[in-house]
Image (spheres, rainbow, N blue to C red):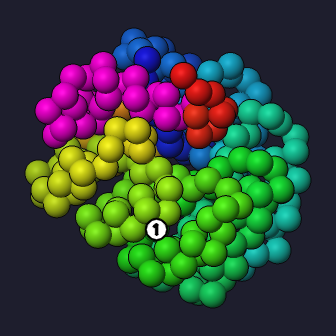
Amino acid sequence: MIVDSHCHLDYEPLINNIDQVLINAKKNNITKLLTIGTSFESSIKVLDIVGKYENIYGAIGIHPNSTTGNLDKLISILELKKKSKKIIAFGETGLDYFYKHSKKNDQIVSFEKHVEFSTVEGVPVIVHTREADDDTISVIKKNLVKTNFLIHCFTGSLDFAKKLLDLNCLISFSGIITFKKSEELRKVVKYVPLDRMLIETDSPYLSPDPFRGKSNEPANVKIVAETVALIKQTNFDLVANSTTDNFHKLFFNEKN
C-alpha cells in the first residue's frame, strides 16, 4: 500500500479525469490520496471531491502566495472544516519568500491562523516553505505543543531538515528527488529517518523522471517510493509501508 500525501485533484487536468486518475492509482497499489486546497474556492472543490470518493481525503487552506487580499476568508476556511470529517488537515499554508506574491506579514498572520484552526479542530498543519527557513522555524517553535506539522515537498538544506526534525515535524518528499540536479536533496532523503517521512506527488506538478514535462498524477508516487528505497539502499516495501504507517499515525492517530 502507498499513500499520496499531497496532490491537487481540483486542478486541471486532474479534476476533469478523476475516475481515470483513481484507476491509475489503484493499478500502482495507491490506496489513499490527500487532496489539498490552496484558496477558499479551491477548498470548496476539495470538500466536494472528498464527499464523492471513499479513498480521497482533503486538507483546506490558503496558500502563502495567495494570502494578501484574502485574509478575510480565513474564518470561512474554519467553517468549511466543520462540514466534513474527511477534511483531515489545514493547509497548505506556510511561508514563501521566493515569489513575493504576498506580503511577509500577511503570510505569517495566515500561517499562524491555520495553526490556531488546527489546534481547535485537532488536526495537523501542512506547511509550504520556500526561502523562509528562519520564520518557518519561529512559527513552528512558538506553536510546538499545540499541533503537528508536516513539511510538504521539502526542497531545503540538510541543516534546515535537521532543525525541523528536532521540532518533531514530519517531512515529505516529491518527484523532485528524481531530478538529476537534486543531489543535495537526495542527501537529505538519506538522512531523514523513515519513521519521520512521507511521500507525495504534488500533482499535477513536479512529474518525476522519466515523465518530466508531462502532467503529474498520484500514480507516480510509486516512483517517489522507489527512489527513496534506492537512496536509502533499502527495499521498496519497507518505504511503502513506513510512509503509509506515518500517514495513518499523523492524520488518523492510528498506531501499529
Query: Is 232 part of what is drawn in magenta?
Result: yes
As displayed, is residue 100 above or below residue 6? below
Query: x, y (%) of residue 238?
Result: 31, 23
Q: Which residue is mark 1?
A: 129
Q: Residues within 10 Å of mark 1 (few under 14, many from 20)?
A: many
Side of 44 relative to 224 (left or right): right
Identify the amino acid type marked 1.
Answer: Thr
Viewer-proximal residue, 186 or 54?
186
When asked about the image quadrant of residue 9, the answer is: top right
Find the magenta span and give its range: 222-248
Query: x, y (%) of residue 63?
Result: 60, 64
Side of 59 relative to 137 (left or right): right
Residue drawn 85% across the image and 65% down it: 75
Side of 32 relative to 158 (left or right): right
Element carrying mark 1: strand
Residue drawn 54% across the image and 79% down it: 138
As displayed, is residue 251 above or below residue 18? below
Query: x, y (%) of residue 81?
Result: 81, 47
Q: Quadrant of the C terminus?
A: top right
As displayed, is residue 94 above or below residue 151? below
- Provide the major secondary structure of the magenta segment: helix
Query: x, y (%) of residue 175?
Result: 29, 44
Side of 244 relative to 108 (left or right): left
Residue 119 in view (yes/no): yes
When asked about the image quadrant of residue 35, the answer is: top right
Viewer-proximal residue, 52 or 59?
59
Question: Outermost residue toward the top?
Answer: 27
Viewer-proximal residue, 99 or 137?
137
Query: Is 50 part of what is drawn in magenta?
Result: no
Viewer-proximal residue, 77 or 167?
167
Residue drawn 11% across the image and 51% down it: 180
